[in-house]
Amino acid sequence: MGGFDPDSPVDAFRCGIWRLNIAAEQQGRGYGRFAVEAVCAEASHRGQRRVTVLWVPHVHGPADFYLRLGFRPTGERIQGQILGELALT
Ligand SMILES: CC(C)(COP(=O)(O)OP(=O)(O)OC[C@H]1O[C@@H](n2cnc3c(N)ncnc32)[C@H](O)[C@@H]1OP(=O)(O)O)[C@@H](O)C(=O)NCCC(=O)NCCS
């Protein structure tokens, strides 16, 4: 899901990706990248300059996927989840 709530008092909830989940048998085929890039394109269209995502730190978690797509941890955690951000160009 793409979440767009530019007036949210919580920075991490203003423009971001929520609960991206690709079916297990379809992973590794580019669908995740496509979904993230689609949300980023919509964010740009809406005049946003930054996209965020939250992920659970786990050995089998999605951290490397988001890092591969250019997201970087902000250093902040929300309810134990790592906050990542991507600056849109
Ligand atoms: C994480 C997830 C969304 C990735 O989706 P995907 O369709 O499998 O990923 P893609 O095929 O689009 O991969 C995009 C790039 O990330 C890389 N990548 C994907 N998963 C990776 C991983 N676990 N570790 C390292 N690189 C990874 C791919 O190699 C690919 O690189 P490339 O385009 O340069 O060749 C998917 O595996 C998933 O739904 N996982 C379970 C649920 C989950 O953790 N969701 C995230 C909630 S925040």
Image: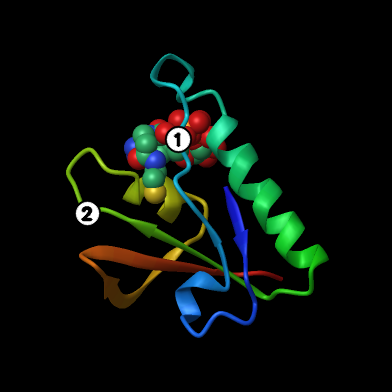
- Asked if ligand 1 lies within 8 A of label 1, the reply is yes
Residue 34 located left or right of residue 57: right
User: Mark on residue 46?
Assistant: none
Ligand 1: which quarter?
A: top left
| Front-lying residue, 23 or 71 | 23
Mark in front: 2 vs 1: 1
Using residue 66 as the reference point, say whether residue 36 is left or right of it: right
- Is 27 located above or below residue 52 in the figure? above
Q: Residue at x 49, y 81 (%)?
A: 11
Q: Disc 1 on helix, strand or loop?
A: loop
Quadrant of the image occupied by residue 31: top right
Q: Residues within 10 Å of mark 1 (few under 14, many from 20)?
A: few
**Residue for point 52% across, 52% down:** 69
Task: Provide residue 40's location: percent of width, then percent of height.
Answer: 67, 57
Indicate how the structure is coloured in the image. Answer: rainbow
The amino acid at mark 1 is Asn
Residue where numbered disc 1 is placed = 21
Q: Amino acid at mark 2?
A: Pro
Badge 2 or badge 1: first in the primary sequence: 1
Residue at which label 2 appears: 57
> For residue 87, which quarter of the picture?
bottom right
In the rendered image, which quarter contains the C terminus?
bottom right
Residue nearest the viewer, comparing 89 with 27: 27
Secondary structure of residue under mark 2:
loop
Give the left or right position of residue 19, taking residue 44 as reference. Answer: left
